[in-house]
């Protein structure tokens, strides 16, 4: 029973390039969440998705960032024209369907993006 | 606007003693509070949660206390073990049935070191 799988684990991009981060949720989980952790800070919510739907994107920067969770395949967080300030650890989490406010998501090990 | 704050960046405890990690929040709309543990280069791991209608929840060596009037919660680990050394994050969420329940608001984290 694999956990939340994120790849790549480490990603280096030059300023202006695109970064694509992938997340495969746990089996049976249909809800995906993306969080970002900047150095020396806590995790910041970015976006909450269900299959083919964006439920809450209130934490997404208005420009250059987008996320999707297609019917088939992993969830993708896409950052266009990366800048140095995008360097961070990006974590994906998943949860099963149903309303469980006490439920702690299962997080992946993260993708560490470095922009040079 | 830091709605969830962990004011102690670090805590050092002797093995076998009690570890007390503190967290304060400002948003009275939060309904659930969660604690996560994080090792370096890994994603956060869910530990324990508490509803805002309770003042205590216990799970093995971990107990979370909530003082709603003071907007303060704490995580007690008894007895502390060297393997507990990690970064501990408290997080909070609203559970008002809207899309916001998918969003966790995290504190900055406290580094716990348990010495043998």
Image (spheres, coloured by chain):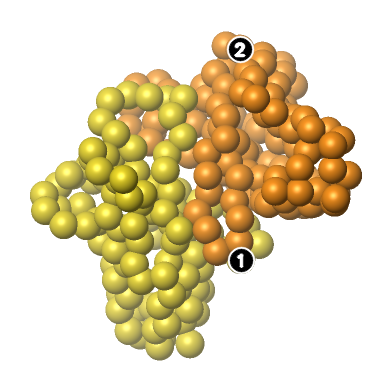
Chain colours: A yellow, B orange
On the rendered structure, is B102 left or right of B17? left
Indicate the chain on which mark 2 is placed. B
Residue at image point 66% right, 14% down: B55
* Viewer-nearest residue: A53 or B13: B13
Residue marked by disc 2: B54
Q: Is residue B107 visible?
A: no
* Same-chain status of marks 2 and 1: no
Work out whether A57 lies above or below A78: above
**Cα distance, mark 2 to mark 1?**
34 Å
Work out whether A8 lies above or below A102: below
Q: For the residue labelled by badge 1, is the local secondary structure a helix, a strand or a loop?
A: loop
Q: In the image, residue A3 lies at what x, y percent?
A: 36, 49
On the rendered structure, is A31 left or right of A102? left
Q: Residue furthest top?
A: B53
Q: Residues within 10 Å of mark 2 (few under 14, many from 20)?
A: few
Residue at image point 29% right, 63% down: A22
Residue at image point 11% right, 53% down: A72
Q: For the residue labelled by badge 2, is the local secondary structure a helix, a strand or a loop?
A: loop
* Viewer-nearest residue: B80 or B97: B80
On the rendered structure, is A100 left or right of B93? left
Q: In the image, residue B92 lies at what x, y percent?
A: 55, 33
**Residues at discs 2 and 1 in contact (Cβ within 8 Å):** no
* Viewer-nearest residue: B22 or A29: A29
Work out whether A113 lies above or below A23: below
Residue at image point 76% right, 49% down: B82
Q: Residues within 10 Å of mark 1 (few under 14, many from 20)?
A: few
Work out whether B107 lies above or below B79: below
How many marks overall?
2
On the rendered structure, is B38 left or right of B85? left
Residue marked by disc 1: A39
- What label does residue A6 carry, if any? none
């Amino acid at each position: 029973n694999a956990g939340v799988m994120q790849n790549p684990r480490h990603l280096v991009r030059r300023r202006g390039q695109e970064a694509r981060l992938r997340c495969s949720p746990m089996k049976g989980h249909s809800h995906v969440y993306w969080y970002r952790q900047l150095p020396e800070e806590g995790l910041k919510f970015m976006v909450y998705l269900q299959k083919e739907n964006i439920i809450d994107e209130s934490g997404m920067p208005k420009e250059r960032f987008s996320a999707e969770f297609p019917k088939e395949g992993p969830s993708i967080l896409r950052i266009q024209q990366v800048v140095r300030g995008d360097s961070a650890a990006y974590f994906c989490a998943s949860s099963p369907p149903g309303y469980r406010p006490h439920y702690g998501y299962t997080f992946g090990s993260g993708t560490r993006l470095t922009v040079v | 606007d830091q709605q969830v704050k962990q004011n102690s960046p670090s805590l050092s405890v002797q093995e076998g003693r009690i570890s007390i990690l503190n967290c304060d929040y400002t948003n009275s709309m939060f309904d659930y509070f969660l604690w996560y543990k994080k090792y370096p280069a890994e994603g956060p791991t869910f530990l324990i949660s508490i509803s805002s209608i309770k003042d205590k929840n216990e799970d093995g060596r971990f107990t979370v206390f909530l003082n709603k009037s003071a907007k303060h919660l704490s995580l007690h680990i008894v007895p502390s073990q060297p393997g507990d050394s990690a970064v501990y994050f408290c997080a909070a969420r609203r559970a008002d049935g809207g899309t916001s329940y998918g969003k966790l608001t995290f504190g900055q984290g406290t580094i716990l070191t348990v010495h043998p």
